[in-house]
Image (cartoon, helix red, strand yellow):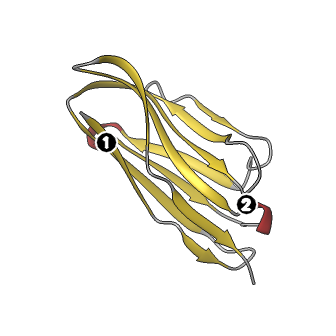
Amino acid sequence: QVTLVESGGGLVQPGGSLRLSCAASGSIFSINAMGWYRQAPGKERELVAIVTSGGTTKYADSVKGRFTISSDIAKNTVYLQLNSLKPEDTAVYYCHANLWSTTGNNNYWGQGTQVTVSS
């Protein structure tokens, strides 16, 4: 069984910063990619950023230049540094991983962490 545990959300003023972390644990053989998605009230879940095992990154246009995704492969952990936060960044942020485990290749989601940007 694989679980993803997120941390680091919270309330921050516009222009502020946060750092999200997500650690994958369980019977993991290898990770293909990890990333972050977000879902604001009344909106669909959208991709924020992903990083592959080879180090390739992809960002949503709305966060380019403000957010940075990184990973620690040895710790099966992915981070998201959120800078210059805007009220429109308010959402529940979900960690996602595509990985190989004892049950094959599957996608996994974390429980979500709330990020609120407000003065």
- Horizontal arrangement in the rendering, residue 72 relative to residue 12 (left or right): left
Image quarter of residue 103:
top left
Image quarter of residue 76:
top left
Q: Is residue 79 above or below residue 96?
A: below
Q: Is residue 34 above or below residue 105?
A: below
User: Residue shown at 48%/38% (left/top)?
Assistant: 96
Crowd around label 1: few <14 · some 14–19 · many ≥20 (10 Å): some
Q: On the image, numbered disc 2 is attached to which residue?
A: 89
Q: Position of residue 4 (x, y in %)?
A: 36, 45
Q: Position of residue 86 (x, y in %)?
A: 77, 67
Query: Quick one: SS at disc 1?
Result: strand
Which of these two is toward me, 108 or 83? 108
Query: Quick one: SS at disc 2?
Result: helix
Image quarter of residue 73:
top left
User: Residue shown at 73%/78% (left/top)?
Assistant: 118
Crowd around label 2: few <14 · some 14–19 · many ≥20 (10 Å): many
User: Residue shown at 53%/34% (left/top)?
Assistant: 51
- Horizontal arrangement in the rendering, residue 69 relative to residue 97 (left or right): right
Quarter containing the N terminus: top left
Amino acid on which the number 2 mark rests in the picture: Asp
Q: Is residue 10 above or below residue 53?
A: below
Q: On the image, numbered disc 1 is attached to which residue?
A: 3
Question: Which residue appears farthest toward the bottom when viewing the image?
Answer: 119
Amino acid on which the number 1 mark rests in the picture: Thr
User: Residue shown at 67%/50% (left/top)?
Assistant: 39
Q: Position of residue 63 (x, y in %)?
A: 74, 50
Q: CA distance from mark 1 to mark 2?
A: 25 Å
Q: Nearer the viewer, mark 1 or mark 2?
A: 1
Quarter containing the C terminus: bottom right
Disc with the residue nearer the chain's start (1 vs 2): 1
